Image (cartoon, helix red, strand yellow):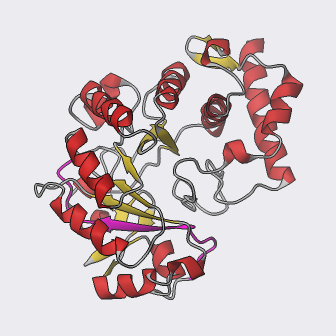
């Protein structure tokens, strides 16, 4: 058995759910009951209902025959990538290699993997099996918050990620979740460091989920996320350098660009799209339909872009004027 996100299942014809938006990546989830006990994630909770979810999304189970048949026609459905995610378990990487080889027999779509690896040799073995990108998920930017929320050493995971990125250029990625106790300075400094190491970054906003230790906390303010999101975009595309960013008590107040120049750079709205591997749009992973959108899963309208840029500019001016 293998799990699919509810949107992936609907797109592939394995469910009759009608979706407001469909993914452009097929999201698969392997394993049950994660050994990690991340306070924001239901997969380490142990509760049957919580285990059915990852992020805001439910993940129904299907047989491999069903999934393989559907994925063999994936490209005709408009899919651009497959993303295999796995809980942490005690079986090592061999089950993952078996799944990767199985997927490689039925599709040539790029394949991302988000799973627990212990060293660069395991990462190399998975790349050799057919994985396009491997995520070592940092998730929590602040080192103290990392210990409290995820457990273990952030330093060790960062060293692994950077070592793998050096040995496997262009093949490593990570997840960063905004709103878990980090300052904007900390978030953007880490983003700058990871980009310089050629690590692909997927930005998320914290979502409080029922059945987790953090279910009663609040998601981050949208303007807070917009500042980090825009800073990431500017750094990634060489439109500004971290050294030009200005902070007040570690809160971003300027990107070092004139207002019109900043408007021009952000005018097409791409800064506010879902980030991460190419072809990944994660519809409503961070938000509910009809509510404020952190990561847009499709091109923004002019009105949406104008609103996002205005919100960003006003948040910068507000701090400067205080």
Instruction: Please give the name of the residue rendered at 23% of the width and 53% of the height, measured from the top-left corner.
Output: 44
Residue 219 can be seen, yes or no: yes
**x then y, percent, for residue 127:** 33, 53
Residue 47 can be seen, yes or no: no
Q: Main secondary structure of the magenta part?
A: loop
Q: Give the range drawn in magenta.
A: 18-36
Judged from this view, the residue extending furthest toward the right is: 260
Judge by depth and name the residue closer to the eye, 166 or 81: 166
In the image: residue 104, left or right of residue 306? left
Instruction: Establish if 50 lies above or below 187.
Output: below
Residue 278 location, quadrant: bottom right
Instruction: Please give the name of the residue rendered at 48% of the width and 68% of the height, measured from the top-left corner.
Output: 109
Instruction: Please give the name of the residue rendered at 11% of the width and 58% of the height, measured from the top-left corner.
Output: 91
Judge by depth and name the residue closer to the eye, 282 or 65: 65
**x then y, percent, for residue 137:** 36, 42
Looking at the rendering, in which quadrant would you find the C terminus? top right
**x then y, percent, for residue 95:** 18, 64
Judge by depth and name the residue closer to the eye, 111 or 4: 111
**x then y, percent, for residue 35:** 17, 51
Residue 28 sits inside the magenta stretch:
yes
Instruction: Please give the name of the residue rendered at 61% of the width and 18% of the height, measured from the top-left corner.
Output: 242
In the image: residue 67, left or right of residue 218? left
Judged from this view, the residue extending furthest toward the left is: 90
Looking at the rendering, in which quadrant would you find the N terminus? bottom left
In the image: residue 68, left or right of residue 10? left
């Amino acid at each position: 058995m293998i799990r699919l996100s509810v949107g992936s299942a609907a797109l592939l014809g394995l469910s009759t759910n009608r979706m407001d938006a469909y993914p452009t990546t097929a999201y698969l989830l392997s394993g049950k009951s994660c050994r990690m006990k991340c306070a924001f994630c239901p997969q380490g909770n142990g509760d049957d209902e919580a285990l059915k979810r990852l992020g805001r999304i439910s993940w129904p189970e299907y047989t491999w025959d069903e999934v393989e048949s559907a994925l063999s026609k994936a490209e005709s459905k408009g899919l651009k990538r497959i993303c295999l995610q796995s809980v942490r378990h005690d079986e090592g990487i061999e089950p993952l290699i078996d799944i990767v080889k199985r997927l490689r027999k039925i599709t040539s779509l790029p394949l991302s993997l988000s799973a627990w690896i212990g060293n660069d040799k395991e990462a190399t073995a998975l790349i050799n099996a057919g994985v396009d990108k491997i995520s070592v998920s940092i998730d929590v930017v602040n080192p103290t918050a990392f210990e409290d929320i995820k457990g273990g050493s952030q330093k060790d995971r960062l060293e692994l990620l950077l070592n793998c990125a050096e040995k496997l250029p262009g093949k490593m990625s990570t997840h960063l979740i905004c709103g878990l106790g980090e300052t904007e300075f900390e978030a953007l400094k880490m983003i700058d460091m990871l980009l310089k190491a050629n690590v692909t970054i997927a930005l998320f906003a914290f979502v409080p989920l029922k059945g987790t230790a953090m279910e009663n906390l609040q998601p981050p303010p949208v303007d807070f996320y917009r500042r980090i999101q825009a800073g990431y975009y500017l750094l990634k595309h060489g439109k500004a350098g971290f050294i030009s960013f200005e902070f007040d008590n570690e809160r971003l107040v300027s990107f070092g660009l004139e207002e019109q120049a900043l408007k021009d750079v952000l005018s097409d709205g791409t800064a506010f799209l879902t980030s991460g591997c190419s072809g990944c749009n994660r519809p409503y992973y961070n938000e509910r339909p009809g509510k404020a959108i952190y990561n847009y899963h499709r091109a923004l309208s002019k009105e949406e872009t104008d609103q996002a840029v205005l919100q960003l500019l006003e948040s910068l001016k507000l701090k400067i004027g205080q």
